[in-house]
Amino acid sequence: MGWIANIIAGLLGSVVGEAILGHWGPQLAGMALIPSIIGAVILVAIVSLIAGRSDHH
């Protein structure tokens, strides 16, 4: 998976993480850092797994 796809997955994961986990912790540019990081890591991992499986088939 390319770096552009990783950036997009990270940004979307950040939004999803903040929506699910709320707006707690330190804020940067109007976004809560901890929920954003958690959501981004989870979504990038999921997208990487899916992309990895489709590359092998």
Image (tube, rainbow, N blue to C red):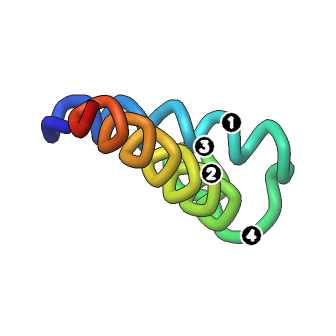
Give the mark, 4 or 2, whose residue is nearer the N terminus: 4
- Which residue corresponds to mark 2? 39
In terms of depth relative to the viewer, which is nearer, 33 or 27?
33
- Which residue corresponds to mark 4? 25
Give the mark, 2 or 3, whose residue is nearer the N terminus: 3
Is the Cβ of the residue at disc 2 closer than 8 Å to that at disc 1? yes
Distance Cα–Cα, label 3 vs label 4: 11 Å
Q: Nearer the viewer, mark 3 or mark 4?
A: 4
Assess disc 4: are there few (<14), some (14-19) or many (≥20) residues with their C-alpha within 10 Å of its C-alpha.
few
In terms of depth relative to the viewer, which is nearer, 42 or 57?
57
- Residue visible at 20% across and 38% down in the picture: 1
Distance Cα–Cα, label 2 vs label 1: 6 Å
How far across and how far down the image is residue 37, in percent? 55, 60
Q: Secondary structure at mark 2?
A: helix
Distance Cα–Cα, label 4 vs label 2: 14 Å
Residue 24 lies left or right of residue 15; in this view the side is right
- Which residue corresponds to mark 1? 16
- Residue visible at 43% across and 37% down in the picture: 50
Assess disc 1: are there few (<14), some (14-19) or many (≥20) residues with their C-alpha within 10 Å of its C-alpha.
some
Quadrant of the drawing holding the C terminus: top left
Q: Nearer the viewer, mark 2 or mark 3?
A: 2
